[in-house]
Amino acid sequence: MQTYKAAVIGAGIIAKIHMRTLHENEYTKLAAVADIDEERARELGEAYGAKPYEDYRRMVSEERPDIVVITLPHFLHKEAAIWCAEQGCHVLLEKPMAMDAAECADINAAGERCGVVIFVGHMQHYFPAVVKAKQIVESGSLGKLVMINDRRHHFYYPEERPAWFLDRARSGGGVVRNLGSHSIDKIQWLTGSPVTKVKADVSYYGDRGDVEGSGLLYLQTASGVPAVVSLCGYRNVSVNETELLFTGGQLKLDGQQSLWIGGAGRGYEPVELGELPEPFAAQWSDMLLAVCGGSGRLASGVYGQSVAAAVDAAYRSHETGCEQLV
Ligand SMILES: NC(=O)c1ccc[n+]([C@@H]2O[C@H](COP(=O)([O-])OP(=O)(O)OC[C@H]3O[C@@H](n4cnc5c(N)ncnc54)[C@H](O)[C@@H]3O)[C@@H](O)[C@H]2O)c1
């Protein structure tokens, strides 16, 4: 494989992991990093031998990277992804792909027009426990998958995250847009089937800007497997758990780290996960594969758009009080 020149746009929390991943990959030359916060770009650039820039357009024009990783606040995903695609860069875009499905469609159209790969960082595809759960679902060893219960409860306040996450105009929504896109991705990925219908109730209590603090979603997938997703960002105990109920037993994902298998009369036992590559490293390897014309587990822009469309449907359902088609 040839070596690809890469640059990172946005030097915030998640960029640190991407920078380390790109730096450690033998087929990648990590050339530069840009952030409007000059200090952040300089610190991260120094740590990984990448040239810091304040202006990502200047960085791309001067460095001409083959691939950019975009880790910006959600409201900037569309303009940055389209502009980079127009410069001929392949794009790995952090999740959620954009503010809504319409923005995702514009990004995908730009990718098509410019002949570049647009992929989305839906990490569920790389967590060892989720990968193993998908293998068990596909093996049919537990019988027919009849339903999924997913719970993600996580303190979602300004003390815990950058302010833009709590401003709808910059984030596109709260726990449903942000944490919900992980849940919807997980359900679509595990079932190999898109969400087709959504009924949802959302709440806006509390002191966290204008984004929602909870969402309870009832989802239907094209394969007929229903799922309930409970997202709660109030002052509760943290939970990140997904149960898959089959006719012949069940699986439980405890976060992304551990997987349990169980059945009537025997409780839960841990599942051996084996050695799998670190998730961000595996994601980046798939990005390089995609740029070479191959395909891996990476989520395409079209897939990223399907996740955004299911989130959009959840908000519409709350507003109308009715089930919505995705
Ligand atoms: N895959 C995951 O599990 C995961 C985890 C956390 C965040 N994310 C996603 O990653 C993205 C970034 O999230 P984060 O937590 O790193 O946010 P962050 O606020 O820490 O980082 C965003 C960075 O973008 C910079 N920025 C803002 N405007 C800019 C501009 N015009 N040009 C250049 N830089 C600019 C900010 O200064 C900041 O440093 C979001 O899409 C988020 O949802 C994904």
Image (cartoon, rainbow, N blue to C red):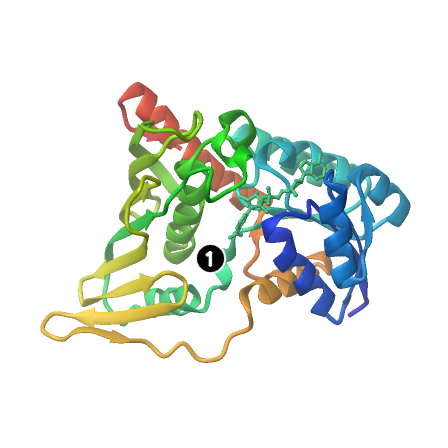
Q: Residue furthest right?
A: 62
Amino acid carrying mark 1 in the image: Gln
Q: Is residue 326 visible?
A: yes
- Residue 37: x percent and y percent? 72, 40
Whether residue 116 is visible to the viewer of this picture, yes or no, is no
Residue 48 position (above or below residue 76): below
Image quadrant, ligand 1: top right
Q: Quadrant of the C terminus?
A: top left
Which residue is painted at 42% across and 38% down in the image? 157
Residue 197 position within the rendered picture, expressed as x and y whole percent measured from the top left: 33, 35
Residue 261: x and y in percent read 25, 71
For the residue carrying disc 1, how many other residues have a C-alpha within 10 Å: few (<14), some (14-19), or many (20+)? Answer: many
191 or 65: which is nearer to us? 65
**Which residue corresponds to mark 1?**
124
> Which residue is at the front of the view, 269 or 118?
269
Query: Which one is nearer the viewer's eye here, 262 or 62?
Result: 62
Q: Where's residue 70, x and y in %?
A: 67, 45
- Residue 288 in which image quadrant: bottom right
Residue 55 appears left or right of 10: right
Look at the numbered disc 1 and give the secondary structure of its residue: helix
Observer-nearest of 279 and 143: 279
Residue at 79% in and 40% down: 54
Q: Residue at x 55, y 28 (%)?
A: 102
Residue at x 60%, y 31% (from the top left corner): 75
Say which quadrant the N terminus sits in: bottom right
The quarter holding residue 146 reads bottom left
Classify mark 1 as within 8 Å of ligand 1 or not, answering yes or no: no
Considering every residue shown, the one lying at the far left of the view is 265
Look at the picture and state if 91 lies above or below 212.
below
